[in-house]
Image (cartoon, rainbow, N blue to C red):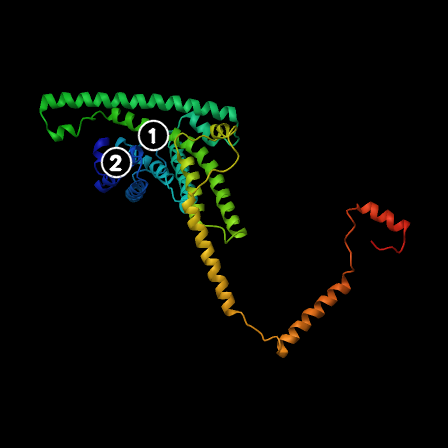
């Protein structure tokens, strides 16, 4: 049986879920603006890819010991499922779920890279960058530049393949008419299709290696940020407001998620800027927050005043309480001599020397 004949035995549900998920992923990559709509698309795409992953595992389309040469072309694209899931999880904008999502994204990037390494798809240069434990800034910079150049070459390769297939489609239309069955098989050359999918995988490998470095930095920043927010709320619970913390956290996440963000460039840009934090809310919003705090404090004071027990100063209980206060104050004055601890701003050595010269004199 030919390789394509074996591929036709794959469940249609796997292809459907993967295709829908990929379409949603492409739409997400090209969409800007509506955050709520984008979050919905991300959630739908994640669900599609997880279902596709479940179908792929159920059908066991990949054997544990298979390498690149053993995998049929039709199944090759399903190796990209963990990569697409990792990219989607990294787009989470809710700060309450952000840390959990980027950790899952980091895990899935590692799953994808390990799969590519075990199946001998990863290049020697990418494998060296992935398994290396030490981080040399100069080496990492050169690797990043090299990956960028290779990705650019692969993008050009994909563009050439698509243009070739488009010309073939137009030629076929002219020869055979608008037959949909013929149009569906335009990429009939198995080597061309395999070349196309492998280019996509190598682009995904390069991006995964870059994203892992960024995610590692972001996990540290978000962890510290959440810790600082929690500590601020613990120190000043009455002054903290979850909306302000949420707004600041979302601003940090939006900066980290931008495609142009780079830690070194960001630090360099901050050198000659003010060290003061910019306002995160408007004056109207701040006044509203202050009013809420004031109303809560007033309500609390009224409740305390309402529950306070008022004693008649002439009753025996009030007299006993006043006697106890007076007795406690007398005991405290007996144990703390007047002027004790007041050295008149003299140093410890001056006081010791004065006491030796004037024994029995109290300071």
Q: Residue furthest front?
A: 314
Q: Is residue 363 above or below residue 26?
A: below
Q: Tag on residue 81? A: none
Dot 2 falls on a residue whose secondary structure is helix
Q: Residue furthest bottom?
A: 316
Judging depth in this view, the residue of 154 and 137 nearest the camera is: 137
Between discs 2 and 1, the one toward the N terminus:
2
Res. 251 image quadrant: top left
Res. 27 image quadrant: top left
Res. 191 image quadrant: top left
Dot 1 falls on a residue whose secondary structure is helix
Q: Which mark is in front, 2 or 1?
A: 2
Q: Where is residue 167 drawn, in percent x and y?
A: 18, 20
The answer to whether mark 2 and mark 1 are in CB contact below 8 A is: no
Q: Residue 292 vs residue 315: left or right?
A: left
Q: Is residue 278 above or below residue 337?
A: above
Q: Which residue is mark 1?
A: 201
Q: Residue 284 vs residue 27: left or right?
A: right
Q: Where is residue 7 drawn, in percent x and y?
A: 23, 35
Judging depth in this view, the residue of 118 and 26 nearest the camera is: 26
Using the numbered discs, state the Cα–Cα distance from disc 2 to disc 1 in whole angstroms. 17 Å
For the N terminus, the image quarter is top left
Q: Is residue 257 above or below residue 343?
A: above
Specify whether residue 100 is in view. Answer: no
x 25%, y 22%: residue: 161
Q: Where is residue 15 drawn, in percent x and y?
A: 24, 38
Q: Which residue is mark 2?
A: 23
Q: Where is residue 294 drawn, in percent x and y?
A: 47, 55
x 32%, y 23%: residue: 155
Specify whether residue 300 is in view. Answer: yes
x 84%, y 55%: residue: 362
């Amino acid at each position: 049986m030919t390789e394509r004949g074996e591929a036709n035995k794959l469940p249609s549900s796997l292809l459907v879920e993967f295709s829908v998920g990929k379409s949603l992923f492409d739409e997400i990559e090209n969409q800007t603006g509506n955050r709520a709509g984008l979050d919905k698309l991300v959630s739908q795409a994640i669900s599609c890819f997880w279902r596709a992953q479940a179908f792929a595992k159920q059908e066991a389309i990949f054997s544990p010991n298979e390498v690149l040469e053993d995998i049929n072309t039709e199944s090759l694209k399903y190796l990209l499922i963990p990569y697409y899931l990792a990219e989607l999880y990294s787009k989470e904008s809710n700060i309450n779920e952000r840390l959990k999502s980027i950790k899952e994204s980091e895990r899935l990037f590692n799953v994808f890279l390990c799969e590519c390494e075990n199946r001998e798809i990863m290049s020697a240069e990418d494998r060296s960058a992935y398994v290396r434990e030490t981080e040399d800034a100069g080496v990492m910079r050169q690797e990043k530049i090299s990956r960028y150049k290779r990705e650019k070459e692969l993008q050009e390769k994909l563009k050439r393949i698509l243009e070739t297939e488009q010309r073939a489609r137009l030629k076929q239309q002219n020869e055979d008419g608008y037959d949909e069955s013929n149009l569906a098989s335009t990429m009939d050359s198995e080597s061309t299709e395999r070349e196309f999918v492998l280019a996509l995988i190598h682009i995904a490998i390069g991006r995964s290696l870059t994203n892992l470095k960024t995610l590692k930095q972001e996990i540290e920043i978000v962890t510290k940020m959440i810790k600082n927010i929690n500590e601020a709320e613990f120190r000043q619970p009455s002054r903290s407001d979850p909306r302000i913390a949420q707004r600041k956290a979302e601003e940090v996440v939006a900066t980290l998620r931008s495609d142009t963000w780079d830690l070194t460039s960001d630090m360099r840009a901050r050198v000659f800027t003010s060290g003061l934090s910019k306002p995160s809310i408007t004056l109207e919003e701040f006044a509203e927050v202050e009013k809420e705090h004031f109303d809560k404090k007033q309500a609390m004071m009224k409740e305390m005043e309402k529950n306070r027990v008022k004693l008649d100063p002439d009753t025996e209980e009030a007299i006993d309480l006043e006697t106890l206060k007076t007795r406690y104050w007398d005991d405290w004055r007996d144990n703390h001599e007047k002027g004790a601890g007041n050295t008149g701003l003299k140093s410890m050595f001056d006081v010791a020397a004065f006491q030796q010269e004037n024994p029995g004199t109290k300071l």
